[in-house]
Image (spheres, rainbow, N blue to C red):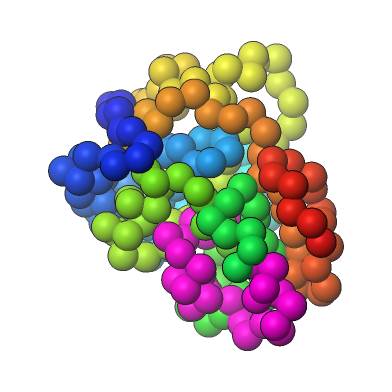
Amino acid sequence: MITKLYNPNPNPREVQRIAAALHEGQIIILPTDTLYAFACGLDHKQAADEIARLKGFRLKQAKYSLLCASLSQAAEYHRPIDRDTFALLKQALPGPYTFIMEASSNVPRACQNANHTIGLRVPACDITRAIIEEYGLPLIATSVRPLVDDESEPETYTDPDLIHERFGTRVALVVDGGIADPEPSTVIDCSDGNTILRHGKGNLDL
């Protein structure tokens, strides 16, 4: 199934329906301010495991991010940080950045990376944030882009209709938020200093 939502002001009734699917443990594909992403509710480990299979992760090597609705919500899922790091997050979010942080005890162990970190995002996308707010918890997510280059055209991972053709039978819902930006988020490691691990969308000055 595919449903269309618009930035700004996504339809509240559709947002409620999507949140209900997440509460049932369903997997969805939704837009962000960069690439489309597989997503499920934070409290549904089996769905997270299935996302790993969809992405091509080995289950014990899966690397997820948490999509959060706000900086204050994200703060519940990382350990205390210093003033400089907080200022950096406040400057960048919402925005196209993934911050690698030391995970708090609120992050399920199965969703943490091997060094007990987690990627945190607050996308500048009204659709994404509205769904998260309605759901009430962050979403476990990873982009629909393959782990390694394949022969697919980039549109396969940026056009919601083509994404639906490819994955529609394996997820409960594809949320059509328009054509995605093909550039991924910029990844910044805040677990051991503030270091850019991947340059992507955005021009944050460290």
Q: Residue furthest left?
A: 13
Residue 62 shows in the view: no
Q: Quadrant of residue 1?
A: top left
Q: State whether residue 6 is above or below residue 186.
A: above
Q: State whether residue 172 is above or below residue 81.
A: above
Check residue 54 for magenta coloring: no
Q: Which residues are magenta?
A: 65-89
Q: Nearer the viewer, residue 56 or 200?
A: 200
Q: Nearer the viewer, residue 105 or 87?
A: 87
User: In the drawing, does residue 201 fall left or right of residue 144?
Assistant: right
Rendered residue at 27%/57% (across/down): 134
List x then y, in percent, for residue 185.
66, 45
Q: Quadrant of residue 53?
A: top right
Q: State whether residue 107 is above or below residue 83.
A: above
Check residue 77 for magenta coloring: yes
Rendered residue at 71%/21% (across/down): 150
Q: Nearer the viewer, residue 129 or 170?
A: 129
User: In the drawing, does residue 101 fall left or right of residue 140?
Assistant: right
Image quarter where the C terminus lies is: bottom right
